[in-house]
Amino acid sequence: MNLKRTAASYTIIDVVSNVIAVAGLWLLIRHISVTAFGLTDLLRTLQVSLVPLVSLNALMSAGRFYFEARDDAERRQILGTALMMQMAAGFVAAGVVVLGQPAAARFLHPSLTMDVALVVALGVPATGMVAALTQAVVLRGSVGGYAALTLSQSLLNLGAVLICVVWWGGGVREYFVGLLAGAWVTAAGGLIAQRRAFAFGWTLPSPRKYIRLGGPYTIAGGIQYTYVLLVRVVLVRLGAGEALGFYAFAERLQQPLTVVVAAVGRSWVPWLLREPAPALTAPRLAARDLNGMVLVVLTALVTFLPELIAVLGGTRYDAVYPVAVLLLVGNWIYFLGDWLVSAGLFVSKQSHHAIWIYLLAYGSAAAFSLVAVARWGSVGAALSSLAASTMVFVAMFAVSRTVWPVDLGLGHLLPGSAVGIGLGIIAGALVPLPFKPLVFAIELAGLHLLRLLPLRLRLAPTAS
């Protein structure tokens, strides 16, 4: 398996998908208020976070068991089991949303009425199914299947904004009606196209083995999702009226970086699991190449961030700049800790360490957010997120090096990357737009000279 080629393929697909998403974002924020945009972000976060928790991270376990399977029939059983668990978990989570609506309206957001909750709930099972179908094409190495699923859903989401918000003049509820239709169409089409990849049933290698592997990630994911929701609730309760909307917009601005992080991370763990033991001298070069892909996107974003805010948000979102910078840096640190370094826990089957790492990091960050949001609003929330990512990285690195002593070359990656990112931030804030393309080219040349970019560099002799 060629890691760079696969990661690049996923990255290109995700970039195209993100361009479509940016078009939808540009339309959406021009037709709803900043406060309403914050509510859509809160509800979307709730929608996508419930299924992994209720399903006990079935997709995570399926990914590990898939590469241990003895034949195609067993692999089909594993994928079918994961899909069935995702579907069942989705309907359970939908019931939780509907039954919990009164409490959610009281504690999460007062605008969460029953009709909105019902529409959001109906989209949860479809979201879980699409996640399972996407994981299946990734595990099977079907880049074409991944492109079909990802781009179809992006185009349908764009259509939801065009029809339900722009044309009908709808608000939050109508927006989620459109997303609901798009998710179910994507799920149905993906299931029909991949029907031969699944053997439906509830067979797993061993319930105890499954719980031991998936359980820690379920708990860790629950801690992370709880923190993400808590920050948004704190912004609603302690921040100014538009604080959640500003924070949500800043998170959307880092979407290009998020999709690249997910793309390279999506290739990283399967590559580690596929490679024979002698080839594991390659992770140092692999980590450099994957970090380089992330670094290119991050440097571009921080360099052109003021212009990006002006084009997408207009003057209403001028205050978002410091929030977006902090979240972008935090996302890179999150990539290092929760994708590159934490893979050692997964490969060595020591994932239970993730529980206390997440509990420490996100618990401390949540407590900090109560003070930071009250004092600095959405900037305080971004500082809290940056603190959480930093603590996760430090703890993951400390633990992973004891259970998976593989050199990822972080002693070279960290300082060089930090200098490049810092120069990009300075250029973004001080350099006029006509000179920024030249400055960005100089930044990339400097990173290449520091051997931080995967330009014409072989991953490793054994990686293809």
Image (cartoon, rainbow, N blue to C red):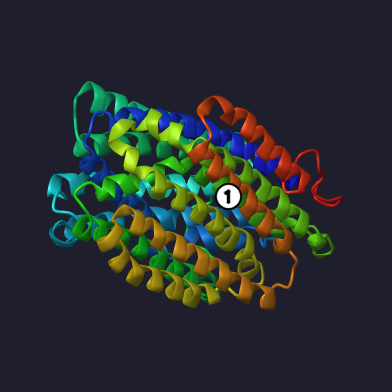
- Left/right of residue 403 with respect to residue 157 in the rendered view: right
Q: Residue 375: horizontal and vertical position, in percent?
A: 27, 62
Q: Residue 258: horizontal and vertical position, in percent?
A: 50, 46
For residue 354, say whether it is visible. Answer: yes
Q: Which residue is drawn at the image coordinates 84% and 63% (left, top)?
A: 278
Which residue is labeled 1 in the image?
422
Q: Report the front residue among 400 and 444.
A: 444
Q: Which amino acid does label 1 sit on?
A: Gly
Q: Report the front residue among 276 and 76.
A: 276
- Left/right of residue 42 with respect to residue 296 in the rendered view: left
Q: Residue 310: horizontal and vertical position, in percent?
A: 38, 31
Q: Which residue is drawn at the image coordinates 78% and 44% (left, top)?
A: 449
Q: Report the front residue among 276 and 279.
A: 279
Quarter of the rendering containing residue 158: top left
Which type of secondary structure does the marked residue at label 1 adopt?
A: helix
For residue 195, say whether it is visible. Answer: no
- Left/right of residue 252 with respect to residue 446 in the rendered view: left
Q: Which residue is drawn at the image coordinates 21% and 43% (left, top)?
A: 35
